[in-house]
Amino acid sequence: VPNTNELNRLLKHFSIPPKTKFTYGTAGFRYHHELLPPIIVRIAIFAALRSSSLDGEPVGLMITASHNPEQDNGLKISDSNGGMLPIEWEAMATDFANAKNLKLLMEIAAKNNSQPGKEMIVHIGRDTRSHSLHLSQLAIRSLKAFGAMVIDHGLVTTPALHYNVLRSNVNHMPNALLYGSSGTSFEKEYLNSIIGSYVSLLSTKSQLYTQKIHWNKRSMLVDCACGVGGLKVPLLNQMIEEFTENSGILLDTSSLVHLTPVNLPGDGPLNERCGAEYVQKQQKLPVIYTETDETLNMEYVASFDGDADRIVFHAKDVDGNLVLLDGDKIAVLVSSFLQEEIEALSTAVPFAKSIRCGIVQTAYANGSSTAYLKNVVKTDVVIAKTGVKHVHTAAHHHFDVGTYFEANGHGTVLFGKKFFELLAKAEQCLVSTSRKNRSNIAWQRLRVLPRLVNQAVGDAISDLFLVDAILYLKGWNLYTWGQLYSDMPSRQCKVKVQDRTMIHTNENETKATSPIQLQMALDAAMDAMAKNSPTGRQANRPRAFVRPSGTEDAVRIYAEANSQKDADALATEAAALVY
Ligand code: NG1
Ligand code: ZN
């Protein structure tokens, strides 16, 4: 039963500052942390109503501003299926965030056919920002005042929170809820399932050989952006060892990757000169705040973002320059692996030929990656709007096995119904064949993937093991992988303008639809540069676009061209046009 007095007190105390309009952005609400308390109170109530509208299925609230600077914070909502809030609900969320008092809130709810129910359950998680604890306590207080049940997971990564939500809905776990307000975490189970699938995947390599082979142990430095991933990565080595010992899977332990976590919470400022966003956007090597002899010469490095839902890989070349393996490179690696395995399976199981495999990218994907995917991997490519909610939906809609990765390293692979039909058919055809048969190996590989790869949302930890396993199975290192294609030189920057919402774009954000003069001027700049470019190939055409960010108060500029000088010049020109 809602405690109206307490709700009124909270709404009054955390009132909306004058002349402020909060909006639901690319991934929820994200602002300077001091602006957040009023949003937290209102969106906590919103989350409870969403749970109520789903007949009491739990949903999730994650307190994080992901890759943003330390002083920002935010709210991400996990729907009951572990995915993002349906886009149709965003307008109501925005209205809620801006509603003054309880009466207005309830009017908005009624207008949206939404009302408090008997069962309202909300999972809460938070990142390591110093203000996240206080904000999560405020969310809990508001939820309780509204009569919702709260399950507090404390410090978790965003993908682990999504998994907790998904998992608690899969089984509709009333028993687990008996623990009360905590102790219903499936995080360990989740990490174990990733690790178990990873080890099984690695073990398929030796099926191809008759003798025992000793592999070079791979050591990976994991830059945790001084964020919450840094609390989880240190547990993984031991979990891998324990799993391998207990599972009875015969595997040379030297084939397992060893993780060295650095940039843990407290080592340095969150996301500052480290982490996935910095490395990918600035194209610079991260600062390793905890530098030791061991960390100095590591060749195999991964960078997470502040809430561990993104990952990019990188290494230093002989000249000390950055070799970046971003989300595009991950998409290429993962999708070619999937195509190869499905192809190998199809010789024994022809149904595999009918599986639609494909990739979803955004306008930020490097032109070379799109060309490579179309021309070499020969896979279908769909370009969707920026943000997981768009790429996820597109992958689900277009493909039976849909891979999506944003260039910034946020992505996953979605396996549809038809893929599971394929696995069932494969089992019938292959169960009595030799485990060394290539189609059988492909089946062994494919069937572990849905447990290795998060089906709800991208996860840096899950993607780390997926990439490492594929590299191991192929016998590649970061350089072999990086050389699949060369990125077109590119430049990204941000411009702060008075009102970024002035800029509107087309469906896949590759062009501005208004102001129309802006796009005309951009087209002219691209044409002029194309005339002076050495090649006339479409794939190498200079390209630039602008769009308002949905997470920061800025307009983002992207440019790519045939030389770094040209990419920089095009970005500078585009920035001047926006300004
Ligand atoms: P915005 O700020 O709307 O561009 C950024 C990323 C998205 C996504 C969200 C959510 C870029 C260019 N944009 O969105 O891909 O990750 O943050 O975290 O990287
Ligand atoms: Zn993130």
Image (spheres, helix red, strand yellow):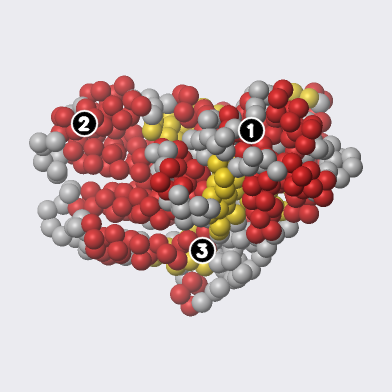
Q: Earlier in the sequence, mark 2 or mark 1?
A: 1
Of circles 3 and 1, the one toward us is: 1
Look at label 2 and name its amino acid. Answer: Ala
Mark 1 closeness class: few <14, some 14–19, many ≥20 residues within 10 Å: many
Of circles 2 and 1, the one toward us is: 1
Question: Residue at (42%, 64%) from the top-left corner?
Answer: 235
Assign a secondary structure to mark 3: helix
Q: Work out whether residue 127 or residue 523 is closer to the camera in this orientation and state it.
A: 127
* Residue 146 visible in the picture: yes
Look at label 1 and name its amino acid. Answer: Pro
Assign a secondary structure to mark 2: helix
User: Against 177, is 236 above or below?
Assistant: below
Query: Picture coordinates of residue 283 (x, y %)?
Result: 61, 54
Of circles 2 and 3, the one toward us is: 3
Residue of label 1: 116
Query: Picture coordinates of residue 533 (x, y %)?
Result: 64, 36
The quarter of the displayed image where residue 299 is located: bottom left
Residue of label 2: 426
Residue of label 3: 231
Q: Earlier in the sequence, mark 2 or mark 3?
A: 3
Mark 2 closeness class: few <14, some 14–19, many ≥20 residues within 10 Å: many
Query: Which of the numbered marks, if any, corresponds to residue 522?
Result: none
